[in-house]
């Protein structure tokens, strides 16, 4: 990794995606994109080298937009990283908690910080993202308005941190995927890996049950299975799945062959190293 490497993320500087990208690639230049489509496009067009995109959160669940964009994006998953989400209450310099009459943040962040909202008894305003709300607070310069945002956003926009770790749940963690234009060539040498893929089963009785049977009989651990409609049809369902195995392992090879038999299509989106978080069940706070 060189200092010139450019990493796309969705949101503004100071967002949790920005934080995840900086931690995964120290010294790289992070490039904000207004939308997920913009981040995928910047990578696909060669404006950046990689993209770091959230895909799951332990409280909010899947990031639905990403599941729809990823399969046809033309890019590949080459890694993953996890970020413990620590929300902070931030305000303009000199403000005190007793001054706060209004809190702004993303709808998910507000929902994850109900205790402090009840404690302060303040009005809440939903904004587009946490970092954007921090910038709004900085631009307004009003001591009565605070934001729930990352500490990084407070540092970037010159705000004071009134209180850290204001989230209700200690396990609030987001998983990010690392995307590149070319797939990762990773050897089947026993190193823990994850294989991500999408598939559509045939519209016949018990197709999903039969399609997934090969993973059970071959001892393959499936850690993720998400379904969502495609093409506006109630009967056209696509599945996003992840397993902890390499496609060249005999068991997974047999399972994928069985899956192919009962599916219209199977596409591998990435084969990449398994992050240590999967095995440690613990993550250092940011």
Image (cartoon, rainbow, N blue to C red):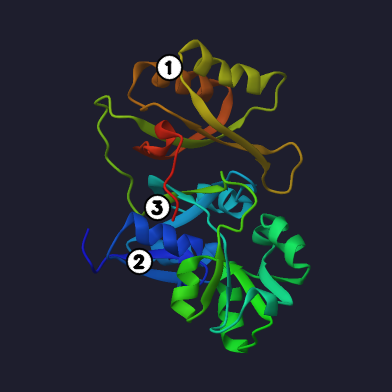
Residue 23, percent from left and from top = 36, 57
Q: Residue at x 51, y 79 (%)?
A: 159
Instruction: Name the residue furthest left.
Output: 2
Mark pair 3, 1: CA separation: 27 Å
The answer to which quarter of the image holds residue 233 is top right
Answer few, some or many: residues within 10 Å of disc 2's Cα (few below 14, many 20 plus, some between 14 and 19): many
Query: Where 264 sits versus 129, above or below?
Result: above
Q: Residue at x 21, y 63 (%)?
A: 2
Depth check: 231 or 238 in front?
238
Q: Residue at x 69, y 18 (%)?
A: 206
Earlier in the chain: of badge 3 and badge 2, it is 2
Mark pair 3, 2: CA separation: 11 Å
Q: Dot 1: what SS?
A: helix
Residue 279, percent from left and from top = 41, 31
- Mark 3 near mark 1, Cβ–Cβ under 8 Å? no
Mark pair 2, 1: CA separation: 37 Å
Depth check: 187 or 199 in front?
187
Earlier in the chain: of badge 3 and badge 1, it is 3
Q: Which residue is mark 3?
A: 179
User: Left or right: where does residue 186 sit relative to residue 126?
Assistant: left
User: Left or right: where does residue 10 sit relative to residue 95?
Assistant: left
Query: Where 226 sits versus 52, above or below?
Result: above
Q: Which residue is mark 2?
A: 48
Q: Which residue is mark 1?
A: 254
């Amino acid at each position: 990794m060189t200092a010139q490497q450019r990493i796309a993320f969705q949101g503004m500087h100071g967002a949790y995606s920005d934080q995840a990208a900086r931690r995964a690639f120290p010294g790289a230049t992070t490039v904000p994109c207004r939308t997920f489509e913009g981040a995928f496009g910047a990578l696909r067009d060669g404006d950046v080298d990689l993209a770091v995109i959230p895909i799951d959160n332990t409280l909010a669940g899947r990031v639905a937009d990403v599941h729809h964009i990823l399969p046809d994006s033309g890019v590949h998953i080459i890694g993953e990283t996890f970020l413990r989400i620590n929300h902070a209450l931030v305000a303009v310099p000199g403000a005190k908690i007793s001054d706060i009459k209004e809190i702004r943040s993303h709808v998910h962040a507000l929902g994850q910080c109900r205790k402090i909202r009840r404690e302060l008894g303040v009005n809440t305003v939903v904004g587009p993202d946490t970092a954007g709300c921090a910038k709004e607070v900085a631009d307004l310069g009003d001591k009565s308005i605070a934001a729930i945002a990352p500490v990084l956003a407070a540092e970037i926009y010159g705000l004071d941190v009134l209180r850290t770790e204001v989230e209700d749940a200690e396990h609030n963690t987001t998983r990010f995927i690392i995307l590149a234009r070319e797939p990762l060539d990773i050897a089947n040498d026993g190193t823990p890996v994850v294989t991500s893929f999408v598939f559509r089963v045939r519209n016949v009785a018990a197709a999903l049950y039969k399609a997934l049977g090969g993973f059970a009989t071959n001892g393959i651990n499936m850690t993720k299975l998400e379904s969502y409609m495609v093409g506006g049809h109630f009967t056209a369902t696509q599945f996003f799945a992840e397993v902890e195995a390499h496609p060249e392992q005999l068991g997974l090879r047999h399972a994928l062959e069985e899956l192919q038999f009962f599916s219209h299509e199977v596409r591998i989106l990435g084969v990449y190293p398994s992050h240590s978080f999967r095995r440690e069940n613990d993550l250092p706070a940011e």
